[in-house]
Image (cartoon, grey):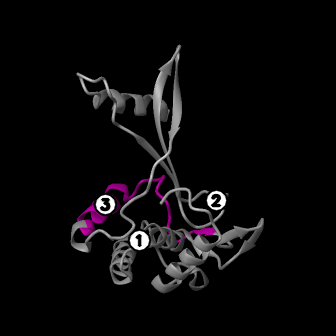
Amino acid sequence: MFLPSQRNYQALFRDAVSRAEPFIGFIVSPYDAALPGPCSALTAFLVQQRASSLVPYALRYTLEGTNAAPPVELIRPKIMQLVAMFRGDPARVHLDALWRAFSWLRAGMPEGPPLTKASKLRVSLARYLCDAPQTDVQSLLDLVDTELQADSDVCSAAPASCNISVEQAQELSMEYASTQTPTAK
């Protein structure tokens, strides 16, 4: 289903002169329980017509901008808009649900504390903003928490054993990072 949609966006943004199609798709896999750790998997791709079918091609990329968190005053309206847009959606993610009973796999063995989907989100955001000033990251994570918890449809009280602080999220993020070979930075 996503291949025709991706193809349509590529065609929409096609340059009439060069015929270049600069629209690149990203698949974010945030809550896949098979992930090795709490950082979301990002896959970049484009599609091309080959014979009678659409063929996806993975793209290599470099993740930049890990040295700055977006300003809270600019991101707050976007977060509020997203929360409002998905309020009442039966397919929405309940962030207070347990993501899994451990944080990461090391040598095939589960390690670390249990994480709710909200806690996993905090760890992942902290990891992708690893080079940003800690106070900016904390402000962003606090904003995300505040806006999501204000909407009881999205996040209600999670079991205390699964809640983690900003500091714990950053520690888990750094500990997880030390066990991994970065695929994008």
The residue under label 1 is which amino acid type? Answer: Ser
CA gap between label 2 and label 3 equals: 29 Å
Label 1 and label 3: CA atoms lie apart by 12 Å
Q: Residue at x 27, y 24 (%)?
A: 18
Pointer 2 residue: 35
**Callout 2 crowding tier (Cα within 10 Å): few <14, some 14–19, many ≥20:** some
Q: Quadrant of residue 181?
A: bottom right
Find residue 36 and report its horizontal and vertical position in percent.
Answer: 66, 62
Is 85 colored magenta in this rendering? yes
Helix, strand or loop under label 3: helix
The quarter holding residue 154 reads: bottom left
Image disc number at residue 85: none
Above or below, 157 relative to 93: below
Q: Which residues are magenta?
A: 75-99
Amino acid type, residue under disc 3 in the picture: Ala
- What separation in Å lies between label 2 and label 1 (alpha carbons)? 27 Å
Q: Give the image location of residue 94, x and y in percent.
A: 50, 64
Mark 3, residues whose alpha carbon is within 10 Å: few (<14), some, or many (≥20)?
A: few
Q: In the displayed image of the protein, which residue is found farthest to the top?
A: 51
Disc with the residue nearer the chain's start (1 vs 3): 3
Q: Which residue is mark 3?
A: 84
Give the amino acid type for the residue marked by disc 2 in the picture: Leu
Q: Quadrant of residue 136?
A: bottom left
In the figure, is residue 161 to the left or right of 123? right
Q: Which residue is mark 1?
A: 152
Give the class, few, some or many, for how many residues have Cα within 10 Å of label 1's Cα (few <14, many ≥20).
few
